[in-house]
Image (cartoon, helix red, strand yellow):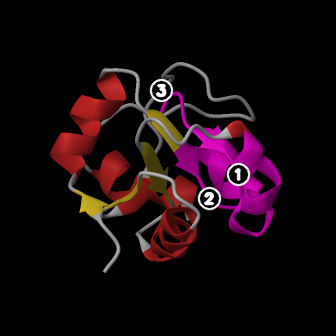
Amino acid sequence: MVPEIDQQRFAEAQAAGALVVDVRNGGEYRAGHVPGARSAPLPNLPLILSELPKDRPVYVICQSGGRSAQATSLLRDLGYDAHSVSGGTGAWIDAGRPAATGDEPGAPTAPATSEETR
């Protein structure tokens, strides 16, 4: 069983500066992502493992939860305190939370719509 964090608890963790890894592809990420989330498309995740800390939680997010569950399982098998974000970026944006756009983790910009991120 992959541990999941619900949207409310994730929003609190994100606001407190949590480490967020977005495993969607680059186009999805550029269209709208959780502010501060680092882009690491699922196939490239192994390339950044050495950059992820094992001494604090890592919150993994995708569009709806499938890819983040896979990534979370991999990370946990390797000793990371990883948690999949329930509902993903789609649920984050649908709830009216801020989104950043572009290639950088960035600060919030105009909220993206669900259609823009699909």
For marks 1 and 3 on the same chain, the one whose residue lies earlier in the sequence: 1
Instruction: Tell me the tag on residue 23.
Output: 2
Quote the CA–CA distance across marks 3 and 2: 22 Å
Which residue type carries mark 1? Ala
Confirm whether the magenta stretch covers residue 23.
Answer: yes
* Quadrant placement of the N terminus: bottom left
Q: Which residue is mark 1?
A: 40
Q: Residue at x 43, y 48 (%)?
A: 59
Tell me if residue 70 comes above or below residue 7 in the rendering: below
Q: Residue at x 47, y 41 (%)?
A: 112
- Using the rendered image of the protein, determine whether residue 29 is visible from the camera's viewpoint: yes
Which residue type carries mark 3? Ala
Q: Which residue is mark 3?
A: 110
> Which tag is nearer the camera, tag 1 or tag 3?
1
Counting from the top left corner in percent of width and height, residue 85 is at 35, 57
Quote the CA–CA distance across marks 1 and 2: 5 Å
* Quadrant placement of the C terminus: bottom right
The residue closer to the viewer here, 58 or 23, is 58
For the record, the magenta segment spans 21-50
Labels 1 and 2 touching (C-beta < 8 A): yes
